Image (tube, rainbow, N blue to C red):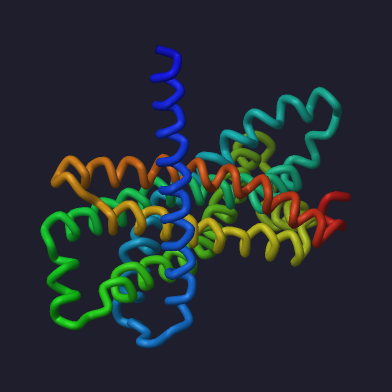
Amino acid sequence: MLGASADRVGDAVLETLAAAGDYFAFAGRAFLTLFRPPYEFLETFRQLDALGWRTVPLVVAAGFANGIVFSMHTRAMLQTFGAASVMPQAVAVTMIRETGPLVAGLLSAGRIGAGIGSELGAMRVSEQIDALEALGVDAFNYLVGTRVLASIIALPILTVTMDFSGIMGGFVAELVTTGMAWHLYIVQAFDLIGFTDFCASTLKTAVFGFLIGTIACYLGFNTSHGTEGVGEASTRSVVFSSIALILIDVLLVKLTYLVFPQIAMV
């Protein structure tokens, strides 16, 4: 019985490693596709609208609420130490350096990942991808390359939107609590934020976009088992993308501190 259990565990490990290898090969091919013609500009813009622009309301609402909640919770702690005056700096630093990028990435993993996974999965099981290839269309470039590129472009834009929505939420909380003026709040909020902070935290979300796009495309492109497989592809896209974002964020934060040590000093 122990031998049978060991065999099952071994088979599971081998299947996981094989799937990981297939994904990395798929992601590498997708990365190279970004730099090779033909460039599907119209389809890329269409995907930017579907994946990016339509996600903006969700990001704005989440960022605004996040800024208000963070300000409400943090104010009580800062008042205990007599440091309530640094509330604008705390909101801006937290949103721009980490909370904004990570929350925007996780929200995008939910909306963009599920959308790509289900769409490509439905196209696979209905043999639309096979039909495109039969017509001589590079289905990988047209379907995968455009979605991955759109995700890479959309994530930094959504992150900036999340950052400033959170700062606005923090301002509303401060306005209601202390009546702080807008000009004073903005000046204080960006007192500790430099161009390096903004660029480092925002550009890393392009990596988030690549992960979301490739994971969702991989699962959707390789869907099987009919409509049940479409649902599984959509669900797995969200789960795997979210886990990958959290893990890679740890590495990117450490890399940021190594490349820009002045950030860690503030």
The answer to whether 89 appears left or right of 5 in the picture is: right
Where residue 98 appears, x then y in whole percent? 65, 47
Residue at 44% x, 27% y is: 9
Tally of numbered discs: 0
Task: Give above or below for 117 relative to 83.
Answer: below
Task: Give above or below for 93 relative to 8.
Answer: below
Q: Nearer the viewer, residue 145 or 63?
A: 145
The answer to whether 257 appears left or right of 19 in the picture is: right
Residue at 36% x, 72% y is: 146
Residue at 57% x, 47% y is: 102
Q: Residue furthest top?
A: 1
Q: Nearer the viewer, residue 230 or 108?
A: 230
The answer to whether 220 appears left or right of 126 in the picture is: right
Residue at 47% x, 45% y is: 17
Which image quadrant: the N terminus? top left
Q: Nearer the viewer, residue 36 or 146?
A: 36
Q: Residue furthest bottom?
A: 37
The answer to whether 37 appears left or right of 253 in the picture is: left
Where residue 266 appears, x then y in whole percent? 85, 49
Indicate the quadrant where residue 39 lies. Answer: bottom left
Where residue 118 appears, x then y in whole percent? 25, 51
Task: Give above or below for 194 relative to 60.
Answer: below
Where residue 57 appears, x then y in whole percent? 39, 53
